[in-house]
Amino acid sequence: MKIRSRKFEGRCARHKRYNPAVDGIHAIRGGCPRCMLLYEIWDTSLQLNKLIRRFDPKYDDLQKPEPIVPAADPRQLSLIAE
């Protein structure tokens, strides 16, 4: 199942500087419905991350997987070996 491969770049057309992660729900002016949706999307993403970590505590989404470096191919000739 693939869930977290989608990146979301959303802004309110009226309140372009509103950032739910920094400003929170109390910074929404006049009950703007677009800002409320942005806050709900951000809050739901936090809840999703908590559920994923509870399902698999060993899962670390902050650490990138290390690339697999293949061992030297024995068929490759070395220029510095004797």
Image (tube, helix red, strand yellow):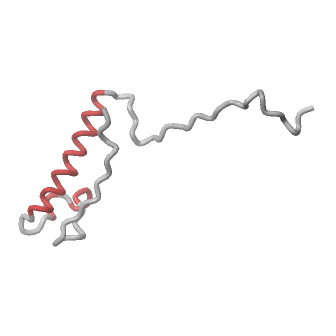
Q: Is residue 57 shown above or below 40? A: above
The outermost residue toward the bottom is: 14
Between residue 74 and residue 51, name the one nearer to us: 74
Query: How many marks can you see?
Result: 0
Point 29% across, 33% down: residue: 52
Along the horizontal axis of the image, is 28 left or right of 42? Answer: left
Give the quarter of the image for residue 77. Answer: top right
The N terminus, quarter of image? top left
The outermost residue toward the front is: 75
The C terminus, quarter of image? top right
The outermost residue toward the right is: 82
Point 73% across, 30% down: residue: 73
Between residue 19 and residue 9, name the one nearer to us: 9
Give the quarter of the image for residue 20. Answer: bottom left
Residue 49 horizontal/vertical position (percent):
28, 39
Point 78% across, 29% down: residue: 75
Along the horizontal axis of the image, is 37 left or right of 61? Answer: left
Q: Is residue 59 shown above or below 39? A: above
Q: Is residue 82 shown above or below 31? A: above
Between residue 23 and residue 68, name the one nearer to us: 68
Residue 79 horizontal/vertical position (percent):
87, 39
Along the horizontal axis of the image, is 31 left or right of 78? Answer: left
Give the quarter of the image for residue 59. Answer: top left
Point 18% across, 57% down: residue: 38
